[in-house]
Amino acid sequence: MIIYEKAYRQGEILIFKVKKLPASYAYNARPIPNGVIREGEKEGHEHKVEGGSAQLSLFGDGETGTLKVDKATTITHPEHNSINLPKGEYVVKVQKEATGKHSHSSVKD
């Protein structure tokens, strides 16, 4: 069970600080060394981990992942305010929107 402590939002990106990441998350995620959480609709408009010391990993869908922050870090995007994240463990998700009675799609800005 994941216990959420705090939530952050930057456009379509949702970031949840958690008490502890489940061990299963480590097996299903692939490291993202450039720190890009998600590309925007326009070139260069990416949600990105910058500064500090953090390890970003995303799952196969590319829309859910984890962020382990060892030293305070910042999430940046050219069209949104930066988010300063303190040391801790986080779950990263892309917001979804309903597109029909039984369907949804990812939001992209």
Image (spheres, rainbow, N blue to C red):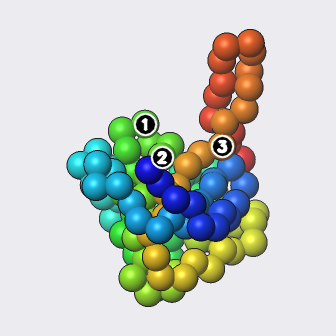
Q: Residues within 10 Å of mark 3 (few under 14, many from 20)?
A: some
The Cα atoms of the two marked residues, 3 and 2, are separated by 10 Å
Say which label, 3 or 2, has the lower sequence index: 2
Q: Which residue is mark 1?
A: 61
Q: Position of residue 82 (x, y in %)?
A: 68, 74
Q: Which residue is mark 2?
A: 64
Q: Which residue is mark 3?
A: 95
- Most foreground residue, 38 or 70: 70
The Cα atoms of the two marked residues, 2 and 1, are separated by 7 Å
Q: Residue at x 51, y 85 (%)?
A: 72
Q: Position of residue 67 (x, y in %)?
A: 43, 65
Q: Is residue 105 left or right of residue 62?
A: right
- Quick one: SS at disc 1? loop
Q: Residue at x 64, y 67 (%)?
A: 6
Residue type pointed to by label 2:
Thr
The Cα atoms of the two marked residues, 1 and 3, are separated by 13 Å
